[in-house]
Amino acid sequence: MSLLSVHLRSTRDDSYKIVIEPGSLAGLPKRLLSLAEGKRIAVVTDRMVEKLYGKRLLRALASHDSRTRLFSFPSGERAKTRRTKERLEDALLSSGYGRDSLLVALGGGVVGDLVGFLAATLHRGVPFVQVPTTLLAMADSSVGGKTGVDTPAGKNLIGAFWQPLEVVMDPLLLSTLPRRQITAGAAEIAKHGVIADKALFHFVEKNLERLLAGDPQVVSRALLASCKIKAGVVSKDEREGGLRQILNFGHTIAHALELARGYQLLHG
């Protein structure tokens, strides 16, 4: 018998910045071009966000780099599937996107999870930037690198841990959201307060109406505190080997309810 050992020690630094800034959408094209460092950018979003912000972002990016393209898919949790991912992969590959690609996940949690998983597997891994457009995605799914798609057996059962290159949050984008969506995000922020920060929970309680109204100052402060909690947990346990399971507080029953109701319920 012959025996060889393959010695692999990871030296990759997956650290990244979370930018929380009202009005940051205006400066997003310049920021993305700087992060791309010459890579070809693909903006991936859903049909609703495409109309609200996607086409505008594409025009701004394409004016600097004509190679930029936008790819979209139907809105909603039901589109977060292996089939949608396959269609996006085929579209990107047929458009000539290679290893020198940077994907931009512009949208809510469905977009972020799906595009993150797509980035993790396209050419065995390309960088991506999270640009969440819902309060729930800002407070939860855009941070931490958990990506994936849903299956008939349940939510997020197929995916990968793939950290973004950067996360850019613009609280002003919440102005186009219905109150139901903002309430879902507020619930996630309150959850972070319950598990790790009494002051954050009381801040949400005291400023709830302003938070639900999308007040940029209140939203920014709440997101900063919430993201600090999640970043702290993820930094200690990236792949959910123990501590990170605390972030699943409430998720287990919520995922079951979502599946049982055909994803008519919002995650928050």
Image (tube, rainbow, N blue to C red):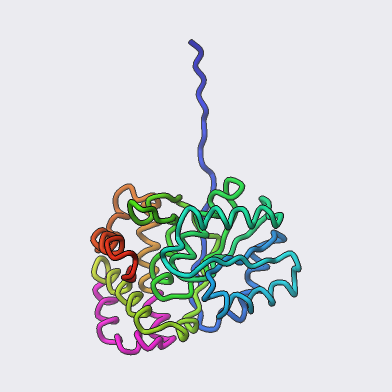
> In the visual, does 173 lie left or right of 241?
right
> In the visual, does 165 lie left or right of 40?
left
| Magenta span | 197-223
256 vs 107: above or below: above
Q: Which residue is drawn at 49% across and 74% down?
A: 169
Q: Nearer the viewer, residue 217 or 171?
A: 171
Q: Residue at x 33, y 71 (%)?
A: 266
206 vs 252: above or below: below
Q: Which of 2 and 41 is in front in this view?
A: 41
Q: Quadrant of the C terminus?
A: bottom left
Residue 225 rendering spot, x and y as whole percentages: 36, 73
- How many numbered discs? 0
Q: Is residue 198 magenta?
A: yes
Q: Which residue is drawn at 40% across and 62% down?
A: 231
Q: Is residue 88 magenta?
A: no
- Magenta stretch: dominant SS? helix
